[in-house]
Image (cartoon, helix red, strand yellow):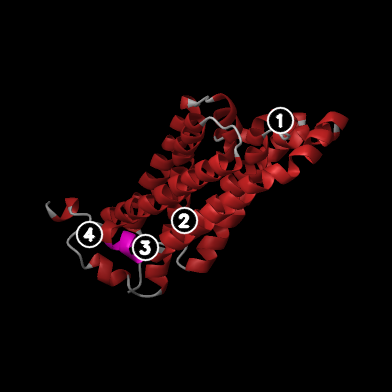
Amino acid sequence: MNDIFRFRIAYQTIKDYKKTTIVLTLLFMAIAVMYSGMFPAFKEPLEEMAGSGIFDSFSSFFGPATFDMATYVGFLNLELYQIFWTVILGIVIGFIAASIVSKEIEGKTIDILMSNPISRKQIVFEKFIGLIPMTLIINFGTMLAVMGITVVIGEELDFYNLFLTHVASIPYFLAVLGIAILISVIINEKMKASITFIALLMGMYVIETMSKTVPDYESIGIISITHYFIPYETLKFGEFNIASALILICITTVCMIISMIYFEHKDIEV
């Protein structure tokens, strides 16, 4: 029983991805600084475009945030959070998580893990736990970068709303991890598992976009995890949707339960 609570595999996973965590954190911090720092140069042109009504044609894609693009908050949302944060970072984290188990099977090292005095369920659970610190460090490291560059360029931004936005990101990225790990225990080849996750997340993003642009498909957005994370509402108004966060946590929980049960009964050639 003591071995179960030592989280040796989780600790080893954190160590294995230490360099990856540092690189990705610095990369996304740099991207955040770049996007945030560009706003002063685009401020006047954006205000002119907003006054001419050009943004109206994009409202069906990006919602009410489109009309706020000439402001710093709106610019940050559309340039950084709406796509780059939700989709690109989601893909990066999911790409890593989708290979977390499959690479052990493909590399024939799974027998080393299973030689530990813990169950297969615990292996999957600890792999999940081991990826959480990486996600949190990237998340809040990027937040600090946005805060820093905002002070430097002298723009107005509610830092509490910014913090709340990154807190709201946590259930979303946990859902990404859960779905990716489920794929990882089902598909034995790490690259195939990672590509499958990317296709799935992009598919969900397209579905969510269709639900916003085509009235007849409005209801299908609920099957996409991107439907439950809308950065603009939190960044602009400080609104934290508890129901959406709970749905994402439920998705994570269900995926992890299925992953652990499936892996427990999976035939593995060692």
Quadrant occupied by the C terminus: bottom left
**Along the viewing direction, whichever of 136 and 114 lies nearer the viewer:** 136
Q: What stretch is highlighted in magenta?
A: 12-17
User: Distance between the Cα atoms at labels 4 and 2?
Assistant: 24 Å
SS for dot 1: helix
Residue at (35, 72) in percent of width and height:
269
Which circle, 4 or 2, is nearer the viewer?
A: 2
Type of residue at label 3?
Answer: Lys
Q: How far apart are marks 3 and 4 (CA)?
A: 15 Å
Measured along the vertical axis of the image, is residue 47 above or below residue 133? above
Label located before the other in sequence (4 or 1): 4
On the picture, is 106 further left or further right than 112? right
Q: Taking the image as drawn, is residue 192 in sight?
A: yes
Can you name the residue that lies furthest to the left here?
A: 2
Decide whether residue 230 is among the magenta residues.
no
Q: Which amino acid does label 1 sit on?
A: Asp
Q: Earlier in the sequence, mark 4 or mark 2?
A: 4
Which residue in the protein does label 3 denote?
Answer: 18
Q: Distance between the residues labelled 3 and 2?
A: 11 Å
Image: 69 above or below 206: above
Location of mark 1 (residue)? 68
Q: Which residue is drawn at 73% across and 46% down?
A: 41
* Secondary element type, mark 2: helix
Name the chief secondary structure element in magenta. Answer: helix
Q: What residue type is labelled 4?
A: Arg
The tag earlier along the polypeptide, 3 or 4, is 4
Give the image location of residue 58, x and y in percent: 79, 36
| Residue 114 pos. (x, y %) | 25, 65
